[in-house]
Amino acid sequence: MCDYSLHAVASRPAELGETLVSTTFPLTTTRGFASEGDPNVAVCLRPGTEVAFEDEVMRDGLVFHRKVGDRLARFRQIETDQPQRHHDALEFANGTIVLVTDLTTGQRAKVLQLPAMPSDTAARPATGVVREAAPVRP
């Protein structure tokens, strides 16, 4: 997913094994991820995507950059019931949750795992022969 404020930016889904870079996109103050080779296209992550940063992650603070204290994170969305707020976040292995837009720019992360695609078999009715259960005998 890409945050609501990146809808005017060209985007594509993340690919397994690719390296992403935290960046600010033209004509927006929102930060997100882009590929190394195409910094003007937002790379969108689906909830459950796991990433590993090359170095300890840094986030913006009120005055100084702050260390998160971890490198491994899972993408998720938070406060989705509140429109006009950033929802894209990373939950780190140490429990820290950081909005993607709060990451300092230039940080590199590798996509380790993509979430499973939802199965459409649950939405389709089952086909075939329906058998009655055999009666239980004491």
Image: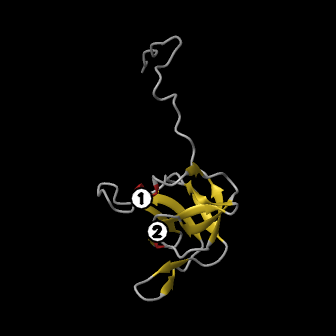
Residue 24 has which mark? none
Label 1 or label 2, whichever comes before in sequence order = 1
Going by the numbered disc 2, the residue's amino acid type is Thr
Whether residue 2 sits left or right of residue 71 in the image: it is left
Where does residue 10 sit, x and y in percent of width and height?
54, 52
On screen, residue 115 above or below 58: above
Where does residue 30 sit, x and y in percent of width and height?
46, 66
Residue 101 has which mark? 2
Whether residue 114 sits left or right of residue 7 in the image: it is right
Q: Residues within 10 Å of mark 1 (few under 14, many from 20)?
A: some
Instruction: Name the foreground residue: 87 vs 112.
Output: 87
Whether residue 7 sits left or right of residue 43 in the image: it is left
Instruction: Name the foreground residue: 23 vs 115.
Output: 23
Residue at (52%, 28%) from the top-left corner? 121
Going by the numbered disc 1, the residue's amino acid type is Ser
On screen, residue 135 above or below 99: above
Residue at (46%, 53%) from the top-left corner? 8
In this rendering, the count of numbered labels is 2
Q: Residue furthest front?
A: 27
Where does residue 23 sit, x and y in percent of width and height?
56, 68
Residues at circles 1 and 2 in contact by the CB criterion of under 8 Å: yes
Residue 5 has which mark? 1
In what element is the residue under mark 2? helix
Quadrant where the C terminus is found in the figure: top left
Residue at (61%, 73%) from the top-left corner? 107
